[in-house]
Amino acid sequence: MGAEARVKRGEPNKTKECGARLFPPGREEADRAKLWRYLWEKREIRHRTLIMFQLFGTWNREFMARLSTSRRFTAMTSAAIWLTFCLPACSQQNSQTPDVKALVKKSLADMVFVKGGTFMMGDFGPSATPEKLPYTAQHENKPAHQITLDSFSIGRYKVTYADFDVYTKATGKPSWPQDAIDITYKRPDYPVGVPWQMAKDYCQWLGQQSGLPIDLPTEAQWEYAARSGGKPLIFATDNGKWEPDRNFPSGDTVANKLAPDFGYGGVSMGTYPIGKYPPNPLGLYDMGFDGRDWVNDWFAPDYYDHSPEKNPQGPATGTEKVIRGEEGGSDETAMTIYRYKKKPAPYALKTLIAGKPVMATFVTDTFRCAVQNTSKVPQGN
């Protein structure tokens, strides 16, 4: 139950009680800053960032400004008080199951650091091909435009059904998928296919468990990482080329070899076990393949016409979310520059069966998470 809900019902807010014990009324922001700085320098902040946001109240410019100037509390005393009185009431890690702890450890170990930089996002064909022609006829990925990104980290692999099962069990959510047909494609090492909101919820939950700012990557981050730091690579393979059954599986291989037990006579939805083919030069597997990846941005066909240069976040609102990657074995949709979109929540198709609308499938709508932090992800926990 959230803090606001507890207040409405008159229940005690343990987070605020914890904060009050450590920093009673009248205690200045400088004291909070001192403790924050100590924990950060000691690398103890990794699993407690979100807790401290709640514990210490407001996060403002005054607080940030005092991180390096406060001398009212000794760092050791502040940390000792916090650990003694507040850790039991505030830490989420104490209640983590072994499965959750293992998932968090694995997920952080698989985060690939991506050094920020500047690149030309979009269809770079005119500047990279001898013919000076675009790679695609799609107008949504034009014009190519300069983008500058801060450093971030992104998952080496897509999130799997096994990963997602840990999440649903830990949060008490229903197992996924529920549809009788979609569940046929569920395998522990296959990328989980979910609606956008479920993908985002998973990443943010992982952030809460790890104490790191984890979310879906932005569209710009996804393309920059797929192109191994914004290089002019049209496919996110080991050599930037389209070589079926060497650096990605052909449609026939997916249908008849990687997924032969689905019982549909060689028909496959297009996903297969993660990590079976070489990664791109950055070390990321299945970027643009093995299903499409959700990103955080709303979709607008003309967004590239007016996208900000620095860390673009996509349109403020919309009705569809951007989804990147190969669809149905098409080399065009597998290109690192190709944009597609889809409604973020479950919806009904126009097709009717027995008079009832058929719900859209999300089997091939996969995702990976990103750490929205310019520092490398700490390891060894």
Image (spheres, rainbow, N blue to C red):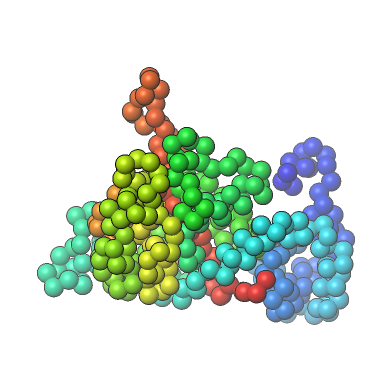
Left or right, 333 with respect to 344, comes to left
Position in image of residue 209 (x %, y %): 66, 59
> What residue sits 48% from the left and 46% below the top?
186
Q: Where residue 72 sits: x, y (%)?
A: 83, 77
Q: Give the residue at x 79% y 71%.
A: 31
- For residue 175, side relative to residue 150 (left or right): right
For the N terminus, the image quarter is top right
Residue 337 appears in the figure: no
Rendered view: 379 above or below 367? below
Q: Nearer the viewer, residue 8 or 130?
A: 130
**Where does the C terminus fall, quadrant-wise?**
bottom right
* Percent x, y of residue 23: 84, 64
Tally of marks: 0
Kindly identify the residue that appears in the image at 67 percent across and 49 percent down. 170
Q: In which quarter of the view is residue 85 placed?
A: bottom right
Q: Residue furthest left?
A: 131
| Residue at point 54%, 58% (across, down) | 215
Q: Residue furthest top?
A: 355
Residue 362 locus on image (x, y percent)? 43, 43
Relative to 96, 297 lies left or right: left
Q: Is residue 134 visible?
A: yes
- Would you place residue 99 above or below residue 128 in this image? above
Q: Is residue 364 above or below residue 45?
A: above
Q: Quadrant of residue 131?
A: bottom left
